[in-house]
């Protein structure tokens, strides 16, 4: 894959275009890995509402970092679909491949990376588009909020001008219109004192305000897909709750689908429609958040939820607490096993788990799990 620089530009796209009927695209698979490394199993991730085509279809996505003398397969045959306007939480501990998934969708993987599978975004396979096409996709139809959004802002430029610059790069119209667009988006995401914020430099804003400005910049051209990679990790709980509210508002107002990456299941309850749980680069459980949280099927998900702080409380507020940590840790040897990659840490393991790979099953409508003893 070609290395590309992170974008600071966004392009307009008609709002709610994602709701139009889009023909189903057949999958094409370009495999740069050996057949052994790439599973062709494909199960639709969940029941897409009838008459609605997926906005995003990730099929058999396998990513292997080849640099540094040692290769790491960060994603193994990842499959899922995202509906227009849907909010998916990607949940998993450090190193499970969450950011690799985000970077794959944005075409931002490093140069020495082997990629297989397909990422169908409406009528385009994102693994096949050329750099000029990326200029019309990245930051415009798909945009991203990074873990430290404030760091993405230019410290010597007024934040309002930075948003206007993004609009200018992608939408026709004079400077006055672009400035009005920037002011409007600041108001839409409910930043109070818009005039002052517009004229402020990043160092003059609080952490929460910087997050909101970064969200404004990411959504000012109404992307159909927004990816947020741990955007609230450095914030205190009250500001976390505010940022989740803003993202919900963006989802509601603009119809943007959202992929929200987190270590913390507590953030997904009451926020995401669906959760995909990742472990060692694999999707091990997928289903509606309320069902998965009420009755997790995979032992890893169960462990995460048992250890997680309860959320939300009776008062609807986030409880911070400690992030869940399941005893043991994933080693490189575990990644290479022929059996279940979670076996060394699993309290529900049986003999078969060490020798055979637990292929994904669909035990009930809308849910997927990879475990021989799921639900036990
Ligand atoms: N550029 C890279 N070169 C080599 N290996 C990498 C690279 N980026 C990530 N990895 C490896 O790929 C695996 C998945 O990493 P990734 O950053 O996607 O995980 P993550 O779930 O986002 O973790 P975290 O929660 O810590 O951000 C890890 O083993 C990581 O060490
Ligand atoms: S397949 Fe076996 S080891 Fe893996 S999660 Fe299920 S019970 Fe545990
Ligand atoms: Mg990450």
Image: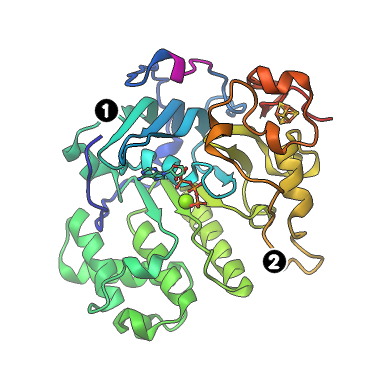
Disc 2 packing (10 Å; few <14; some 14–19; many ≥20): some
Q: Can residue 171 be seen here?
A: no
Q: Is residue 80 left or right of residue 269?
A: left
The part of the image, by quadrant, that contains residue 225 is: top left
Residue at which label 1 appears: 128
Using the image as rendered, state which of residue 365 and residue 254 is in the foreground.
365
Which residue does the image show at 40% across and 21% down from the upper left? 23
Using the image as rendered, state which of residue 224 and residue 332 is in the foreground.
332
Q: Are marks 2 and 1 in contact (CB under 8 Å)?
A: no
The Cα–Cα distance between marks 2 and 1, rounded to whole angstroms, is 41 Å
Residue at which label 2 appears: 318
The secondary structure that dominates the magenta segment is: loop
Q: Is residue 317 left or right of residue 38?
A: right
- Asked if the magenta segment contains residue 175, the reply would be no
SS category of the residue bearing label 1 = loop
Using the image as rendered, state which of residue 365 and residue 77 is in the foreground.
77
Segment colored magenta: 36-41
Can you give x and y, in whole percent of width and height, for residue 321 in the image?
72, 66
Q: What quarter of the picture does the N terminus occupy?
A: top left
Relative to 81, does residue 4 appear above or below in the rendering?
below
Using the image as rendered, state which of residue 260 and residue 93 is in the foreground.
93
Which residue does the image show at 44% across and 67% down from the upper left? 188
Q: Earlier in the sequence, mark 2 or mark 1?
A: 1
Which residue does the image show at 23% across and 77% down from the upper left? 157
Can you give x and y, in whole percent of width and height, for residue 110 in the image?
29, 42
Q: Is residue 41 left or right of residue 204?
A: right
Relative to 151, does residue 137 appear above or below in the rendering?
above
Query: What kind of colouring is applied to the model shown?
Result: rainbow
Which residue does the image show at 66% across and 21% down from the upper left? 358
């Amino acid at each position: 894959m070609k290395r590309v620089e992170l974008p600071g530009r966004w392009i307009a796209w008609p709002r709610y275009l994602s709701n139009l009927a889009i023909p189903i695209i057949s999958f094409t698979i370009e495999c740069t890995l050996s057949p052994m490394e790439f599973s062709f199993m494909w199960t639709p991730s969940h029941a897409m509402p009838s008459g609605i085509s997926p906005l995003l279809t990730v099929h058999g996505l396998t990513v292997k970092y080849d640099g540094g003398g040692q290769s790491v397969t960060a994603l193994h045959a990842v499959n899922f679909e995202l509906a227009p306007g849907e909010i998916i939480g990607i949940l998993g501990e450090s190193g499970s491949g969450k950011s690799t998934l985000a970077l794959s969708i944005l075409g931002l993987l490093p140069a020495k990376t082997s990629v297989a599978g397909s990422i169908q975004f409406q009528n385009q396979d994102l693994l096949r588009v050329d750099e000029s096409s990326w200029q019309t996709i990245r930051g415009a139809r798909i945009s991203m909020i990074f873990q430290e959004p404030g760091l993405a802002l230019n410290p010597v430029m007024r934040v309002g001008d930075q948003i206007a610059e993004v609009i200018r790069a992608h939408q026709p119209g004079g400077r006055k219109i672009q400035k009005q667009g920037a002011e409007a988006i600041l108001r839409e995401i409910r930043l109070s004192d818009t005039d002052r914020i517009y004229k402020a430099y990043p160092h003059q804003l609080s952490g929460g305000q910087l997050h909101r400005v970064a969200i404004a910049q990411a959504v000012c051209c109404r992307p159909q897909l927004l990816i947020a990679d741990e955007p609230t990790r450095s914030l205190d709980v009250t500001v976390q709750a505010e940022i989740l509210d803003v993202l919900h508002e963006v989802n509601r107002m603009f119809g943007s689908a959202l992929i929200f990456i987190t270590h913390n299941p507590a953030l997904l309850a009451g926020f995401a429609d669906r959760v995909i749980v990742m472990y060692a680069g694999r999707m091990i459980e997928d289903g509606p958040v309320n069902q998965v949280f009420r009755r997790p099927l995979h032992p890893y998900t169960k462990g995460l939820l048992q250890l997680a702080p309860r959320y939300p409380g009776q008062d609807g507020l986030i409880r911070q607490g400690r992030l869940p940590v399941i005893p043991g840790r994933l080693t490189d040897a575990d990644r290479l096993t022929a059996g279940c990659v979670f076996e060394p840490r699993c309290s529900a393991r049986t003999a078969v788990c060490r020798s055979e790979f637990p292929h994904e099953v669909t035990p009930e409508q809308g849910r997927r799990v990879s475990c021989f003893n799921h639900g036990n």
